[in-house]
Image (cartoon, rainbow, N blue to C red):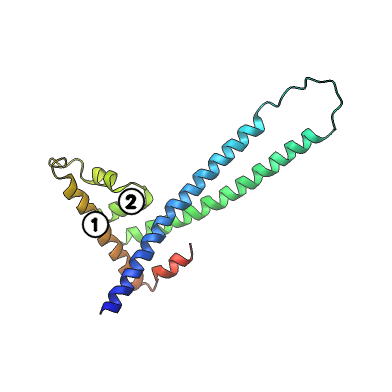
Amino acid sequence: MDELKSEFKEKYYALKDWLRNYRELDKEVKNMLKILDQHEATMTSIGSPVLSDMPKAKGRIGDRTSEAVVRKMEIEEDLELAIQERDIRKAEIKGYIRKLKKADERMVINLRFIGMYDTYDTTSIMFGDEPDFLAKEESYSRRVLELQKNALQNMVSYLDSIGKDPREMKEMI
């Protein structure tokens, strides 16, 4: 019996890690967009004026421009691959979320792992309109954590039912 609990726990934490990895994929896309923006700004910036009448080597400006264009194309290719990987993961996660039977469980997983909200914000979004929210905020926060735990357990059970092991999914990251 303890062996079954231990195996389930391993699957639970593997699934949680796999879901968290979506955040890293999203951060990677955002970082690459920053790099691309910076590179484009550098490409379009005005070069320093020529203040000398000394002869210069021909072709260097063209080389720099072509190098910058090639580098931009490389960044764009890498970005496209990162976006595809992130979007595939997001679609996969959303598919598993749809299999959850309870709306609150679907919402908490969506907020925490797709929306990337922390527990406080998730609690506020889910229960902030309750009249006793401020007085019982800690209680609602525990409820969110319990909903998340139950949702993850239900996702592990669903994955078991279709023959997927979250520990193997984790290795595919």
Pinpoint residue 101: horizontal percent, then vertical percent.
26, 61
Residue under the point 72% across and 41% down: 67
Q: Name the mark on residue 147.
A: 1
Residue under the point 35% across and 64% down: 13
Classify mark 1: residues with Cα within 10 Å, few (<14), some (14-19) or many (20+).
some
Pinpoint residue 70: horizontal percent, then vertical percent.
70, 44
Tell whether 104 sits left or right of 48. left
The amino acid type found where label 1 is placed reads: Leu
Question: Quadrant where the N terminus lies?
Answer: bottom left
Residue 97 location, quadrant: bottom left
Residue in the foreground of this view, choosing between 72 and 91: 72
Give the residue at mark 2: 112
Picture layout, residue 66 above or below residue 146: above
Pinpoint residue 134: horizontal percent, then vertical percent.
16, 40
Residue under the point 65% across and 44% down: 73
The amino acid type found where label 2 is placed reads: Arg
Q: Earlier in the sequence, mark 1 or mark 2?
A: 2
Pinpoint residue 24: horizontal percent, then vertical percent.
46, 52
Element type at marker 1?
helix
Element type at marker 2?
helix
Picture layout, residue 42 above or below residue 107: above
Mark 1 to mark 2 CA distance (whole Å): 11 Å
Q: Name the mark on residue 113.
A: none
Residue under the point 61% across and 49% down: 77
Residue in the foreground of this view, choosing between 48 and 71: 48
Tell whether 83 sits left or right of 4. right
